[in-house]
Image: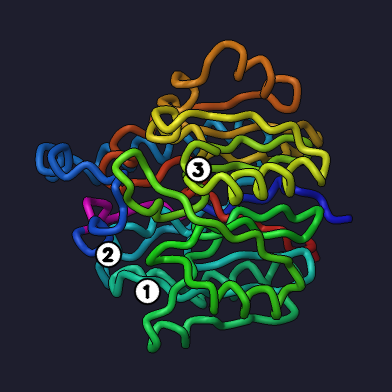
Amino acid sequence: MQPQATTHIMMIRPVRFGFNEETAESNAFQDAALATQTKDSAQQDALTEFENMVAQLTAAGVDVITYDDTPEPYTPDSIFPNNWVSFHQSGKVILYPMQAENRRLERRMDIIESLKEHFQVDEVIDLTHFEKEGKFLEGTGSMVLDRRYKMAYACLSPRTHPEVLDAFSEATGFSIVKFNAADANGKAIYHTNVLMCIGDAFAVVCLQAITDPDERLYVREELEKTGKQVIEITLEQMNSFAGNMLLVYNKRGEKLLVMSTQAFESLTAKQRDELDDYAVLLHSDLSIIERNGGGSARCMMAEVHLTEK
C-alpha cells in the first residue's frame, strides 16, 4: 500500500500573478472587486506570500522543489501547478486538459525533464487531447486522491468531465467516486479540492455541499470504508478554504497538515483538536493568492510521489 503523503513538494514561483478573467466564470472563489484594488500590487504581494510559505515548509523539514515561472507566455495562475500535472509512485506522470486557454500554457516539459534527474519517471501520460473536445480534468484540483486505496474523489463541474475521469482511471487503476456539489448559491463547485482533503486516517469534507442525500451518504460511506475519521466542515468554512489542505511528511517522517491562515482561523477548537491528533497544523497567510486566484495552500503544491534515484 503506497503512502498517502510525500515529503517532496513542487511549487512554482510566480512572476506575473493576477486575477485571471478566463477562469472567473466557473470559479466563485475569485473576488473580482478585491482584484481590482490589488491589481498593481498582486504580483509582489503574492510573491511575498509564496516565499513565506516555502520558508515555513522548508523550516518544518519538507523538501520543497521550486521552479520560477517565465514572464512569457502570460500565465497568471502558474502558482497552482497541481492542476496541470500529477506524479505517481508507479513512475507515471500525468498531464491534464485545462479549461482556460491561458492555463494550458502552464504545462512545462522542462520541469518534468529537470525532475527526471532526481526521480524515476517511467511514463508520461498525456490526457490533453481532450481539450479539443471541450472535456477537462484539472489534476488534483478536479480530483482528491486517496493514494493508499487508489481512489479518486471527484465532483463533476465544467472543469471535471466524467469521460476524462474514466481515462485517468484506465491509465492509473484508480477507482472513481464521482458526485455533484454546489455552493450556497447553487453554483457547481469548480474543483473538488476546495471541498475536501484526504489524509491517511482522516478526511475533511463539506458534505453540506453535496446536495443529493444519496450521493452525500455514498461519499461518507466510501471514506469510512477505508477507515477515515470524517471531519465535516460547513459551507462557510469551505468558502474560507478549510477544505483546501494537504497532508505532507517532513524528512523526519512527521506528518504536517498544510493550509492557509484563513482556513485555520475558520476551524472550530474541536476541529483543530481532531486534526491535531493526526498531524501538526501549519498555516500561512495567503489572502492575496486566495482572493485573486481562487485557490489556496493545497492548489500551490504538486506532490512528487515518484521514487528517488
Secondary structure found at label 2: loop
Disc 3 marks a residue whose amino acid type is: Leu
- Give the x, y percent position of residue 259: 52, 33
Could you say whether the residue bearing mark 1 is in a helix, strand or loop?
helix
Nearest to the eye among marks 1 and 2: give it. 1
**Relative vertical location of residue 8 with respect to residue 86 in this rendering, above or below:** above
Left or right? Give the position of 125 relative to 142. right
Bin the neighbour count of mark 3 within 10 Å (Cα to Cα): few under 14, some 14-19, many 20 and up: many
Q: Circle 1 is placed at which residue position? A: 104
The numbered mark, 1 or 2, whose residue comes first in the sequence reads 2
Q: Is residue 57 visible?
A: yes
Q: Could you tell me which quadrant the N terminus lies in?
A: bottom right
Name the image quarter holding the C terminus: bottom right
Per the image, the residue denoted by label 3 is 195
Q: Position of residue 4 (x, y in %)?
A: 76, 48
Which residue corresponds to mark 2? 71
Q: Amino acid at mark 2?
A: Pro
Viewer-closest of 269 and 207 = 207
| Gap in angstroms between the C-alphas marked 1 and 2 | 15 Å
Residue 15 part of the magenta segment: yes
**Segment colored magenta:** 12-20
Is 70 positioned to the left or the right of 235 in the image? left
The residue at 40%/87% (across/down) is 133
